[in-house]
Image: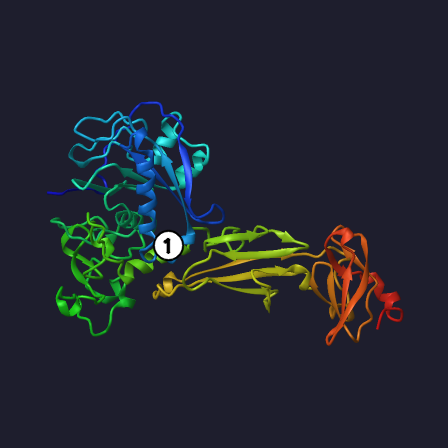
């Protein structure tokens, strides 16, 4: 009979083995570093040195399975995953400590002797615990998945309370990892009832942590976190019958409690773990919560906070900084669903960008440049989970490098060292380079909108036509 051991919140023992650890190797196996991506490090437990190839195969197949599940699949580019080769002396976890090189774990009665604070505590407390590919801070900030080398005869799964470490056995690894990481990343609760009465998500009817996504403690519609997903024709509470087999409603029995705790669906990945790789897909309520938490990141409410509330691939230069030349860019992380929307404005007036960047030279003055972002998703229905943010830069063109009157303001900058001069305006002969020096200009083409004028590339990027030309150029320029 398959033995399932669930490590619940608060059940982990406070034991940290006093031992030295050798540095280990971390291999990048998914995604790329950079931006606001979510890093996951997968560790080996009870795999011997001779089983390194076996561990790598298990991890590779498990990660691929994870990204067949929605919404992990659609947001795959938001994740960067490493596998950490942390071999143990023994490959069987019995009733005595295994003398593990790294974790020294034992599972007597289903408890882990990893420290209560998980991998971050090992990084801080265990001499030598680390890898050359990632800094100590990077390891502590990462989500940690400890894969235990157990076969079909036992399934270990759980999350260490209050931190980012989850524990799974290699059997059913990919699907169970999706379930456990949904706890860690999205704060989703378990939806199975067990035999208890009370649960862990609410205390005295008040949420232990907020927001609560997938557990309700009341039948009042306004107190149901997922009320936007419930059809008006669905009864509250909802009977667990075939008629409502695929419905979103309010089903009794969740959060380890058979009383007074409700879940949104009869079938969901968060309802339980299995040992046959047959986890049901996430219900729309849990999928919404995970998508929201993957898209968003915590930051302050300061309008000039340089950190975006939406996870991005690249932002340059840092938001909140002053810009006098060059380009400003906001590059979203690519997704296999609705892309993030970016609207640009300068001094509260809409402006257009080319691709993901905007050339400040086209703005023609000083002020505030804003990138207004909306992190919507087809998986998100609750308006509270649509993430919005605005990044700001102060644009200040140096004296002598901006237009000074209406005539010069009609000249448009088309890119580095290139201007479009309307046919009604004389073509300038000089401009100012990024270093402030004068640069010669020459007309290179005539278009229906005017002359295309190029500056010498010898002085680098050209900013604006030199306003000093205004008094001498009215009669002598190219027409």
Residue reaching furthest top? 19
Q: In this view, does 57 lie above or below 460?
A: above
Q: Nearer the viewer, residue 345 or 448?
A: 448
What residue is pinned by disc 1? 293
Q: Is residue 419 left or right of residue 277?
A: right
Q: In this view, does 71 lie to the left or right of 108?
A: right
From where the camera sits, is residue 313 visible? yes
Q: In this view, does 237 lie to the left or right of 360?
A: left
Place residue 446 in its image quadrant.
Answer: bottom right
Q: Is residue 428 above or below residue 28?
A: below
From where the camera sits, is residue 163 visible? no
Task: Please identify the quadrant where the C terminus is shown.
Answer: bottom right
Spot occupied by residue 309 in the image (x, y as percentages of width and height): 46, 54
Q: What is the image's colouring?
A: rainbow
Q: In this view, does 151 lie to the left or right of 22?
A: left
Q: Which residue is drawn at 76% across and 54% down?
A: 457
Spot occupied by residue 221 in the image (x, y as percentages of width and height): 23, 66
Spot occupied by residue 22 in the image (x, y as percentages of width and height): 38, 25
How many numbered badges does the structure rendering display?
A: 1
Spot occupied by residue 330 in the image (x, y as percentages of width and height): 54, 57
- Regarding mark 1 in the picture, which secondary structure is present there? helix
Q: Residue at x 52, y 56 (%)?
A: 331
Q: Which of 282 and 391 is in front in this view?
A: 282
Q: Nearer the viewer, residue 32 or 185?
A: 32
Q: Is residue 308 above or below residue 231?
A: above
Place residue 41 in its image quadrant.
Answer: top left
Task: Please identify the quadrant where the N terminus is shown.
Answer: top left
Judge the density around disc 1: few (<14), some (14-19), many (≥20) Cα neighbours within 10 Å.
some
């Amino acid at each position: 009979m398959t033995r399932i051991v669930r490590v619940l919140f608060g059940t982990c023992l406070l034991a940290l083995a006093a031992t030295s650890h050798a540095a280990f190797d971390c291999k990048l196996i998914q995604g790329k570093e950079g931006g606001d991506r979510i890093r996951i490090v997968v560790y080996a437990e009870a795999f011997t040195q001779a089983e390194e190839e076996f561990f790598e195969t298990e991890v590779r197949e498990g990660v691929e399975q994870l990204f067949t599940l929605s919404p992990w699949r659609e947001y795959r580019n938001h994740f960067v995953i490493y596998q950490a080769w942390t071999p143990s002396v023994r490959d069987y976890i019995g009733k005595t400590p295994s003398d593990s090189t790294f974790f020294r774990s034992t599972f007597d009665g289903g408890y882990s002797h990893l420290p209560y604070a998980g991998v971050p505590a090992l990084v801080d407390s265990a001499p030598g615990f680390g890898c050359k590919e990632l800094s100590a801070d990077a390891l502590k900030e990462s989500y940690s998945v400890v894969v235990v080398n157990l076969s079909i005869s036992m399934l270990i799964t759980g999350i260490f309370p209050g931190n980012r470490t989850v524990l799974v056995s290699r059997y059913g690894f990919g699907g169970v990892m999706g379930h456990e990481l949904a706890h860690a990343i999205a704060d989703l609760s378990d939806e199975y009832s067990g035999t208890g009465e009370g649960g862990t998500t609410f205390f005295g009817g008040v949420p232990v942590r907020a927001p609560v996504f997938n557990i309700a403690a009341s039948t009042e519609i306004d107190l149901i976190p997922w009320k936007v997903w419930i059809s008006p024709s669905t009864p509250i509470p909802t009977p667990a019958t075939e008629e409502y087999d695929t419905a979103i409603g309010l089903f009794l029995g969740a959060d380890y409690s058979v009383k007074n705790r409700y879940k949104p669906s009869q079938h969901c990945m968060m309802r339980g773990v299995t040992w046959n790789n047959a986890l049901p897909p996430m219900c729309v309520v849990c999928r919404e919560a995970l998508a929201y938490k993957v898209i968003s990141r915590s930051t302050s409410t300061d309008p000039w906070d340089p950190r975006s509330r939406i996870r991005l691939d690249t932002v340059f230069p840092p938001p909140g900084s002053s810009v006098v030349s060059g380009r400003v860019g906001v590059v979203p992380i690519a997704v296999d669903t609705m892309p993030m929307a970016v609207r640009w404005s300068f001094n509260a007036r809409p402006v257009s960008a080319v691709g993901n960047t905007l050339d400040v030279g086209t703005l023609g003055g000083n002020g505030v440049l804003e990138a207004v972002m909306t992190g919507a998703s087809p998986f998100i229905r609750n308006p509270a989970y649509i993430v919005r943010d605005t990044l700001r830069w102060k644009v200040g063109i140096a004296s002598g490098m901006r237009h000074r009157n209406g005539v010069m303001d009609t000249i448009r900058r088309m890119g580095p060292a290139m201007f479009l001069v309307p046919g009604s305006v004389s073509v300038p002969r000089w401009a100012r380079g990024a270093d402030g020096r004068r640069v010669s200009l020459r007309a290179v083409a005539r278009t229906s909108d005017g002359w295309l004028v190029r500056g010498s590339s010898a002085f680098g990027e050209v900013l604006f036509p030199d306003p000093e030309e205004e008094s001498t150029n009215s009669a002598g320029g190219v027409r």
